[in-house]
Image: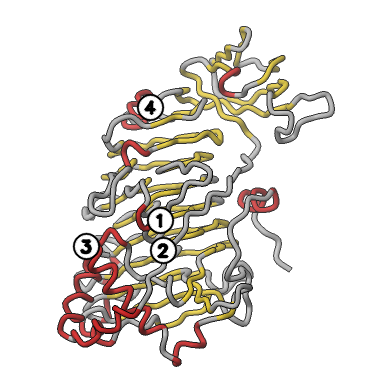
């Protein structure tokens, strides 16, 4: 992204007369959305075979009992001695718990895996770096600033819908960004399932906007320039919110399924060309909401070779709640610097005021004009750099219309194209003023998909 910013800056200075347009543009901030989200698990509660589980902490309640040949229960202490399935019955403290019966009990199918039960950051971090499977048995908060590197090993984190609060690693400012919480490098393979990622947690009523929020790092980073290795990331049934980018991929493979990414001070999911085989993103039955820039961004650089362009494969449904008004549409995040942020976005807003772009907009319920910022494909330098491929944008679940985004004319010498894939104004599936609200229908669809008529 920085390459694009600098390119636009250089040519904008050459065409300095455009700067005057910035002064009259009001750059409105992006407000954080804080409606609580919950996710349904796929049917199993996970436990590891290493270390015991205190059920009173993992599943608060009483009257625990199990039917198992590979586990024992002593009071509230569960010990598992082999992989496999068994049944757990208990009375949850939460009287409105999912699948609660008339007698106040819940029956869970428990899936035991060869892995480590963890209840603190030190144990989670050390075991993940060692390539072990870990199973979260409570909410966990990161400690210190050190990134967890997953290098040349395979690790899976089963979150059991617990929270992974990563502010100590990711916290930063506009000028000094935070770190990535997890770096997947070399031949590293990382799977995250049923994890609630938080870069920062906002208090109820807290007045904050994304451009100046905490949590300026990234949750997951796979940045690779080595053709002899190939990192892989899988994110399944997770929530990721309050960060800069949520996930950044370069020269790696990433699969996102049944997942929600929300509140980003840049694009939510980003892929970039590399000097090796390009980034491949597979996105299925997922939701992106409330980004300063866009839901998904694919960046192409001139230096890339034919095999290194980005590929985005879409499947099922992909909902993107990210409509922008003429004064909130942004191409650059604030972390690129206050001057560039105001200059570039001011020029973009000036372009969007022109009548030839009226067809990009639709009226919201509040009477204001909105354009949908779904997926952005950028290219710099030679047009050959913009060979990113998007597959699956023609099914019932995903029908985004391609539009040429109005880059300032002075930028065309270097920043060649900016393609915007957005909701068709003639077939609006998500209203301009709609926000992502938690509901059981969506939670179910994230796991099982959506039926299309």
The answer to which of marks 1 and 2 sits earlier in the sequence is 2
Query: Crowding at label 4, few (<14), some or many (≥20) Cα neighbours within 10 Å?
Result: some
Residue 275, label in figure: 3
Query: Crowding at label 2, few (<14), some or many (≥20) Cα neighbours within 10 Å?
Result: some
**Residue nearer the viewer, 224 or 349:** 349
Measuring 38% from the left and 52% from the top, which residue is drawn there?
A: 247
Using the rendered view, name the quadrant where residue 190 is placed. top left
Element at badge 4? helix
State the residue position of label 1.
210
Look at the picture and state if 396 lies above or below 41: below
Please indicate whether residue 219 sits to the left or right of residue 17 in the image. Answer: right
Look at the picture and state if 16 lies above or below 130: below
Q: Residue 277 location in percent, x, y?
A: 29, 61
Query: Rounded to the nearest whole Å, what is the CA distance between mark 1 and mark 2?
Result: 7 Å
Query: Rounded to the nearest whole Å, what is the CA distance between mark 4 and mark 2?
Result: 34 Å
Look at the picture and state if 421 lies above or below 152: below
Query: Rounded to the nearest whole Å, what is the CA distance between mark 4 and mark 3?
Result: 35 Å
**Residue nearer the viewer, 295 or 66:** 295
Residue 156 in sight: yes
Query: Crowding at label 3, few (<14), some or many (≥20) Cα neighbours within 10 Å?
Result: some
State the residue position of label 2.
29
The answer to which of marks 4 and 3 sits earlier in the sequence is 4
């Amino acid at each position: 992204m920085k390459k694009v910013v600098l390119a636009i800056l250089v040519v904008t200075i050459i065409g300095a007369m455009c700067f005057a347009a910035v002064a009259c543009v009001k750059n409105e901030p992006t407000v954080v959305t804080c409606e609580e989200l919950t996710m349904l698990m796929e049917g199993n509660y996970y436990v590891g075979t290493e270390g015991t589980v205190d059920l009173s902490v993992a599943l608060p309640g009483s009257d625990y009992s199990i039917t198992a040949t590979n586990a024992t229960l002593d009071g509230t202490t569960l010990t598992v001695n082999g992989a496999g399935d068994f049944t757990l019955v208990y009375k949850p403290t939460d009287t409105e718990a999912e699948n609660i019966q008339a007698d106040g009990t819940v029956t869970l199918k428990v899936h035991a895996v060869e892995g480590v039960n963890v209840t603190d950051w030190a144990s989670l971090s050390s075991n993940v770096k060692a390539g072990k499977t870990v199973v979260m048995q409570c909410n966990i908060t990161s400690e210190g600033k050190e990134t967890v590197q997953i290098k040349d090993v395979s690790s899976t984190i089963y979150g059991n819908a617990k929270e992974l609060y990563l502010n100590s690693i990711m916290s930063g400012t506009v000028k000094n960004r935070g770190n990535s919480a997890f770096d997947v490098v070399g031949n590293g393979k990382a799977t995250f399932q049923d994890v609630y990622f938080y870069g920062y947690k906002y208090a109820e009523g807290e007045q904050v906007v994304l451009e100046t929020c905490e949590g300026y790092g990234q949750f997951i980073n796979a940045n690779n320039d080595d053709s002899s290795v190939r990192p892989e990331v899988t994110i399944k049934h997770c929530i990721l919110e309050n960060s800069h980018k949520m996930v950044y991929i370069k020269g790696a493979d990433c699969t996102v399924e049944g997942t929600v990414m929300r509140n980003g001070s840049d694009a939510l999911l980003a892929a970039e060309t590399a000097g090796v085989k390009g980034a491949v993103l597979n996105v299925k039955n997922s939701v992106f909401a409330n980004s300063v820039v866009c839901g998904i961004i694919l960046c192409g650089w001139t230096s890339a070779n034919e095999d290194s362009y980005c590929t985005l494969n879409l499947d099922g449904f992909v909902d993107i709640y990210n409509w922008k008004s003429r004064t909130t549409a942004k191409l650059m995040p604030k972390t690129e610097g206050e001057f560039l942020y105001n200059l570039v976005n001011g020029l973009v807003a000036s372009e969007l005021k022109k009548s030839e772009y009226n067809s990009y907009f639709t009226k919201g319920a509040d009477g204001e004009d909105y354009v949908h910022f779904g997926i952005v494909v950028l290219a710099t330098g030679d047009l050959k750099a913009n060979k990113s491929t998007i597959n699956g944008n023609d099914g019932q679940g995903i029908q985004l219309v391609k539009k040429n985004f109005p880059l300032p004319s002075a930028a065309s010498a270097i920043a060649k194209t900016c393609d915007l894939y957005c909701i068709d104004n003639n077939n609006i599936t998500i209203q301009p003023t709609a926000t992502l609200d938690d509901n059981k229908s969506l939670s179910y669809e994230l796991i099982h998909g959506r039926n299309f008529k």
